[in-house]
Structures are given as structure tokens and as C-alpha cells.
Image (cartoon, rainbow, N blue to C red):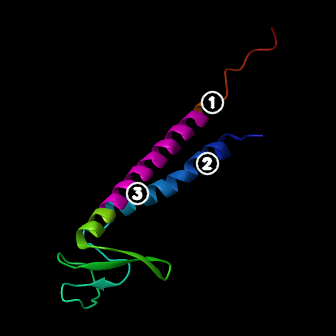
Amino acid sequence: MDYRVPLVGLFLVPAVGGAANLASALTAPSEVVCPGENVGEDGEEHPGPMEPGDTRCSVLDGTVAVGTRSYEQQRRVQSLERRRDARDGSLLLAYSAAGALLAWRATRPGPREDLTG
């Protein structure tokens, strides 16, 4: 039974997630977006991305508010999330490439010996 291709394929599965994480990090918009209720300087809730001076962004866990962040705090959180996604995606791609290469090399057929001797 030839198990070389399925084995290499198993190592390539994480590459899909890694590529998605890396693409997400590289294409993320630079605007600061509040994941919940966004309150401006005037104390009124407003839709859309946060702007410098926005005082409160409700952080949600499902539908329950668990905390608030200022504009700068939300900007730092989004920056950290982008860096984490880029790091995780790169690591998954490197793992997949190294694992697939090692599996391919380890399962290649060896030299055939002449048994008629």
C-alpha cells in the first residue's frame, strides 16, 4: 500500500489554516473597529470605526459586555491580534512545509537490490 501521498497530505492540511491566518493578518484594515457599542466624545453611541477621542468601546463575550476599552487600547489590541495571526500563520506554514518535505523524503523508495545474485 502506498501511503506516501496521504502522509504528505496530512502535513499539508495545517497549511490551509496557516495561509488563512497569514492572509487575514496581511489584509486586515488599519481602522480601529469596536467589537461592541462605540461611544464617542459626546457620550453618544455611534456606528462605524472608532476615532481618536472615542471614550468607550464595550468589549463583548457573546452578547454580554465584559469590559470597556479606549481608542488607544482597542488600537493596541487589534495590532496584537494582527501580529499573533501573522506569527501563527507563519509557524503553521513552516510546520507544514517541513513536515511534508520530511515525510516525502522519508517515504521515498530506496535503491532496489538485485536478488538474482
Between circles 3 and 2, the one closer to the viewer is 3
Residue 101, above or below 110: below
**Disc 2 designates what residue?**
9
Residue in the picture at 17% in, 75% down: 52
Residue 80 located left or right of residue 11 = left
Along the polypeptide, which appears first: circle 1 or circle 3?
A: 3
- The residue beneath circle 1 is 106
Q: Which residue is at a point 67% across and 28% down the rendered structure image?
A: 109
Quadrant where the C terminus sits is top right
Q: Mark 2 and mark 3 in contact (Cβ < 8 Å)?
A: no
Location of residue 27 by image quarter = bottom left
Residues at marks 3 and 2, CA–CA distance in whole angstroms: 23 Å
Within the image, what quadrant is residue 79 found in?
Answer: bottom left
Residue that lies at the very extreme toward the top in this rendered image: 117
Local secondary structure at mark 2: helix
Closer to us: 66 or 7: 66
Q: Which residues lie in the magenta part?
A: 79-104
Q: Main secondary structure of the magenta part?
A: helix
Q: Residues within 10 Å of mark 3 (few under 14, many from 20)?
A: many
